[in-house]
């Protein structure tokens, strides 16, 4: 069964009021377990709104979302969210940030240490365990964010333009490292981005949304072989997909 299904979903802010604004309309999607799906579209098309509803931050005005057949109502640890702006706690070290969720749930000190060691190494921060966020670059703080979400052991990771504020070189490195981490964990990832090249490079499937009200205008299956490296971005097959998706967003 797919991890998340979206059934005939629409959303109107201020429904049944004079200021009503419909941002999503007639969305039907499914996200198979262990898949990596990106959602792209122009600004204001509702892609981040859709992701936040999957996280349970608020409910759609029409339609439904389910996780393993159960309606999504509110937040829970089965769905982890990574936002564009880093959300690290400045008063905690890297290690304590990463183990924050398990610690809240009563993990023993030994379990916390094991979780910290596993995910700090997985996200490439070994040697920085005792550093404070103020001592880290933007890319490193984003690694802390991702490690903390993974350490909470969700079934689904929801990522809202997590690399959007990074410089181009750091962004490409983070994309490659995220793929390595995903390849080991095989969590379901749903990734919102404005960057078509990023979406193609990361994903099994790219969902293209129309301008507001957001609808699904196209779903592109990405059959590029894995593992992927940056040289793949220069191949004819990659560039053909990029041109195709760019053309869809321009209309």
Image: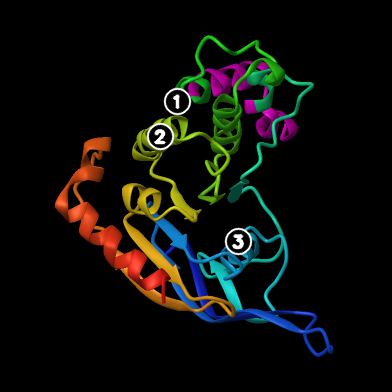
Q: Earlier in the sequence, mark 3 or mark 2?
A: 3
Q: In this figure, which residue is indicated by the disc labeled 1?
A: 122
Element under disc 2: helix
Instruction: Please tell me which residue lies in front, 12 or 63.
Output: 12
Circle 1 residues within 10 Å: few <14, some 14–19, many ≥20: many
Residue position marked by numbered label 3 in the rendering: 48
When the figure is inspected, residue 125 is found, relative to residue 212, above or below; the finding is above
Q: Earlier in the sequence, mark 1 or mark 2?
A: 1
- Asked whether the residues under the numbered discs 1 and 2 touch, taking CB atoms below 8 Å apart as contact, a structural biologist would say yes
Q: Which residue is depicted at the point 35% across and 64% down?
A: 246
| Left or right side of 199 for 97 | right
**Pointer 3: residues within 10 angstroms few (<14), some, or many (20+)?**
many
Query: For residue 45: magenta?
Result: no
Q: Which mark is first along the chain, 1 or 3?
A: 3
Magenta residues (range): 98-118
**Residue at horizontal 43 percent and vertical 46 percent from the top:** 187
Residue 87 higher or lower than 116, as above or below: below
Which residue is under mark 2?
A: 181
Residue 19 % position (x, y): 82, 84
Query: Of circles 3 and 1, which is in front?
Result: 3
Residue visible at 41% across and 38% down in the picture: 175
Q: Say which quarter of the image contains residue 216.
A: bottom left
């Amino acid at each position: 069964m797919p991890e998340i299904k979206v059934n005939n979903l629409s959303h109107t802010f201020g429904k049944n009021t004079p200021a009503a604004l419909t941002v999503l309309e007639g969305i039907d999607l499914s996200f198979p377990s262990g898949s990596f799906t990106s959602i792209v579209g122009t600004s204001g098309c509702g892609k981040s709104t859709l992701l936040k509803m999957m996280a349970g931050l608020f409910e759609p005005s029409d339609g439904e979302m389910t996780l393993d057949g159960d309606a999504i109502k509110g937040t829970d640890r089965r769905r982890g969210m990574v936002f564009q702006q880093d959300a690290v706690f400045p008063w905690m070290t890297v290690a304590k940030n990463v183990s924050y969720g398990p610690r809240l749930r009563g993990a023993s000190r030994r379990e916390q240490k094991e979780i910290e060691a596993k995910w700090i190494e997985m996200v490439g921060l070994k040697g920085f365990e005792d550093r404070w966020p103020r001592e880290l670059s933007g890319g490193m703080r984003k690694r802390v964010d991702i490690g903390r979400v993974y350490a909470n052991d969700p079934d689904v990771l929801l990522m809202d333009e997590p690399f959007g504020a990074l410089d181009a070189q750091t962004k490409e490195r983070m994309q490659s490292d995220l793929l390595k981490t995903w390849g080991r964990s095989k969590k379901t990832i749903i990734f919102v981005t404005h960057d078509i090249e990023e979406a193609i490079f990361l994903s099994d499937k790219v969902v293209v949304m129309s301008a507001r009200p957001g609808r699904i205008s196209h779903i592109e299956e990405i059959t590029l072989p894995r593992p992927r490296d940056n040289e793949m971005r220069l191949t004819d097959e990659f560039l053909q997909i990029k041109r195709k998706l760019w053309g869809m967003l321009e209309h």
